[in-house]
Amino acid sequence: AGTIRVAASMHHVSLTLDILAALMDAHTGVVGDLLCDGGREDQEDAHMGSCSKACELAPSFCDQPRLRRIHDPAAIARAEAEADILLCFEYVECLFLVHLYGRPFILYDGTQYGSTLRWHPN
């Protein structure tokens, strides 16, 4: 089977890695692009938005050849456009990316934060 590229927005550290790991374990063709644009790379206690923190907690996962960490905004945009599946945390981000690229998506955890759209959890 061919390659299935998953573009994963780095938000919640453990959930992002858990979902990517499950997808990569389920199919050897899955390749993960970890999109590192959260702006929290230097925050020591970050559990959100930090690829550095994620890879500090799970170095063997981050070192595998089927995972790329992408920091450059232009490269992130390319990875999102080329992805077969989008993995996103925030409802509005997912809505935008799916509308823009027409790709299947996995929205995780962020549904509780959809309250900013209607002022109550969706």
Image (cartoon, rainbow, N blue to C red):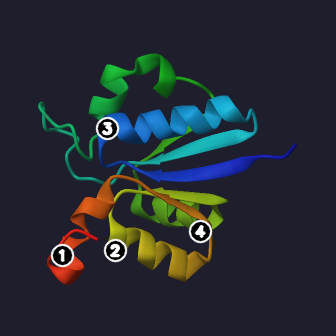
Question: Label 2 belongs to which residue?
Answer: 92
Would you call the spot at circle 2 few (<14 residues within 10 Å), some (14-19), or many (20 or more)?
some
Nearer the viewer's eye, disc 3 or disc 4? 3
> In this view of the protein, which residue sits in the foreground, 56 or 120?
120
Question: Label 4 belongs to which residue?
Answer: 81
Mark 1, secondary structure of its residue = helix
Tell me the CA gap for discs 2 and 3.
Answer: 19 Å
* Contact check, label 3 and label 4, Cβ < 8 Å: no
Question: Label 3 belongs to which residue?
Answer: 13
Residue 81, horizontal then vertical, whole percent: 59, 68
Of the residues shown, which amino acid type is indicated by label 2?
Answer: Val
Mark 3, secondary structure of its residue = helix
Compared across the picture, whether 70 is left or right of 66 comes to left
**Mark found first going from the N terminus, 2 or 3:** 3
Mark 2, secondary structure of its residue = helix
* Contact check, label 2 and label 4, Cβ < 8 Å: no
Of the residues shown, which amino acid type is indicated by label 1?
Answer: Thr
Residue 13, horizontal then vertical, whole percent: 31, 38
Nearer the viewer's eye, disc 1 or disc 3? 1
* Contact check, label 2 and label 1, Cβ < 8 Å: yes
Mark 4, secondary structure of its residue = helix
Would you call the spot at circle 3 few (<14 residues within 10 Å), some (14-19), or many (20 or more)?
many
Quadrant assignment for the N terminus: top right
Residue 67, horizontal then vertical, whole percent: 57, 35
**Mark found first going from the N terminus, 4 or 1:** 4
Up/down of 5 relative to 117, above or below: above
Residue at 68 percent of width and 33 percent of height: 26
Nearer the viewer's eye, disc 4 or disc 1? 1
Compared across the picture, whether 40 is left or right of 82 comes to left
